Image (spheres, helix red, strand yellow):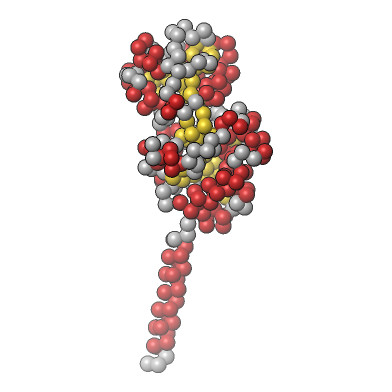
Amino acid sequence: MSSVIPSRFGRLALACALLTGLAAGAQASTLDKVKDSSSVRIGYANETPFAYTALDGSVTGESPEIVRKVFERMGVEKINPVLTEWGSLIPGLRASRFDLIAAGMYITPERCKQVLFTDPHYQLPDTLLVKTGNPKGLHSYEDIAKSGAKVAIMSGTVNLGYARNSGITDEQILQVPDTTAQLQAVRAGRADAAVGTQLTMKGLADKGGDSVEAIAEFKDDPAHTGYGALAFRPEDKDLRDAVNAELKKWLGSEEHLATVKPFGFDQSNITDKTAAELCGQ
């Protein structure tokens, strides 16, 4: 009898230790996992200059390069990119397909209900891509609404809401998966215009050659200025806070400005707005 009791207690102690270990493993935060593996997964959608697949197959753009520099400062060496369509970024993040979104995503109150944002790392206005010469004289959402023109908008972007709020009907809106499709729609005449960030539309105009242009004067509500940031799952506040702390120390530095310069960003794109302010609007 005396030899059985210690055995039972021993087995019980072992079981408790195993359960404790399993529980500790199950509760390991994403921040801990990222640090332990020295790698992080980023979700992105192909949108120049924010995040895109380069011709050599590498992933670059303003947001991935910022992530690379910031995580280096945190001791994390490997960035694993996961390509998805824009409209699938938040669902993919929440389904744990990746650890954060690095795609130049604008902070909006609606998105703040689904994800946690860092403070913005840029501010940027929008403009239109049109046929060369702007044959329909489009300079605002209101112009599109009144003329009955068709506009190509990337699915899942804030521009959909802006367009509808300006009186543009769903029949006038051509939803497309990415910016390449926006350019193709305008060049082929399936849309009279495409709308997106100033840098993106200028980049498409450069790709499109003489057939298209990004208009210089786009009349838009100043409240539509976009503020781009990195996004995290609501339960990953510690990871978001760690990244945010590094961003605050780094944004505006010479290294930061040199990192984003190839993508068309400069000092004028830096903002002192916070995620808390923008989420509360």
In front: 78, or 100? 100
114 left or right of 212 in image: left
Relative to 61, say whether 146 is above or below: above
107 left or right of 37 in image: left
Q: Is residue 31 visible?
A: yes
Residue at image coords 56%, 34%: 270
Relative to 234, say whether 227 is above or below: above
75 left or right of 106 in image: right
Q: Position of residue 12 (x, y in %)?
A: 40, 79
Q: Is residue 82 visible?
A: no
**Where, quadrant-wise, is the C terminus in this rendering?**
top left
In front: 232, or 43? 232
Q: Position of residue 148 (x, y in %)?
A: 35, 11
Q: Position of residue 266 (x, y in %)?
A: 61, 30
Residue at image coords 53%, 13%: 212
Q: Position of residue 40 (x, y in %)?
A: 55, 48
In front: 232, or 143? 143
The tally of labels here is 0
Residue at image coords 47%, 31%: 226
In front: 123, or 200? 123
Relative to 193, say whether 54 is above or below: below
**Where, quadrant-wise, is the N terminus in this rendering?**
bottom left
Residue at image coords 66%, 35%: 258
Relative to 259, say whether 71 is above or below: below
